[in-house]
Amino acid sequence: MNHAVISGDIIASTSLNEHGKTKIEANLNSLIKELKKKYGVYGRVLKGDYIECYVQEIADVFRVALAIKSFVKSIEISADDVNSNESGRLKLFKTYGIRLAIGIGELSRLDLKNGIIDGEAIYFSGRIINEDKTHNKEKVTIKNTLFIKSNNDNLDKEIQPLLALIDVLISKNTQKQCEVLYLKLIGYSEESIVKKLKKKQPTINEQSTSAGWTAIEKAALRFEYIIKSKKE
């Protein structure tokens, strides 16, 4: 039986000072609580800048990954949160936020009560993230930040182009646009977002449109269709 796991690594996290690291960790823990309410996700933060999530429904894992990506990019990190000699790397965080890998495969051990997740799904996702960390590099070149690895090569070939396109789209979005994207991905209507963010409807609509919500929603629906068709 296959399962879905997401592993993620905050980009340029070593450039953050203690205040910045505390802010990131607190926000990630808040995110996990929201994802648990919406999608039943089990998540944990490791070392303050690394996240692992077990997603109960494989069809939800694409939306969950994009929600994580959008949420992290919506965190307000300023020069005050970065070490003075590494302020140049702040742009990397603002552009990309986090690298994420979806792993789909079997799990030999799954005991969420005791925080045990072991098997090929988490091995797949963790291997991708750990192969190309941006930590402690003088020059960082980032080409992609959304990946998938499963025990089905055809599935990977079909999904990776979707991830690559959405990756580019989200990387161009602002902090405010990502805030709106995140709320939409966890099920908020535009009317609810207007009330939550205390902004006018035309502003939210414009941010949603310019952030590429229509394309993102179509990509998520396509992913769900592909996953469900594989089960049949």
Image (cartoon, helix red, strand yellow):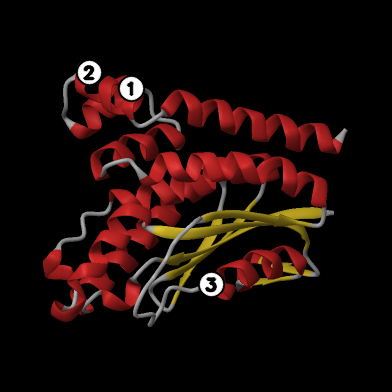
| Dot 1 and dot 3 residues touching (CB under 8 Å) | no
Mark 2 = which residue?
201
Q: Earlier in the sequence, mark 2 or mark 1?
A: 1
Mark 3 = which residue?
132
Give residue 103's quadrant in the image. bottom right
Q: Give me the disc on residue 9.
A: none
Mark 3 falls on what kind of element? loop
Mark 1 = which residue?
190
Of the two numbered discs 3 and 2 in the rendering, the one whose residue sits closer to the viewer: 3
Asked if 84 appears above or below 93 in the picture, the reply is below
Residue 215, given in percent of the width and then of the height, sits at 49, 27
> How many neighbours does mark 1 have within 10 angstroms: few (below 14), some (14-19), or many (20 or more)?
some
| Dot 2 and dot 1 residues touching (CB under 8 Å) | yes
Give the Cα distance between marks 2 and 1.
7 Å
Q: Earlier in the sequence, mark 3 or mark 2?
A: 3
Is residue 122 found left or right of 180 in the rendered image? Answer: right
Q: Earlier in the sequence, mark 1 or mark 3?
A: 3
Q: Residue at image x 72%, y 63%?
A: 121
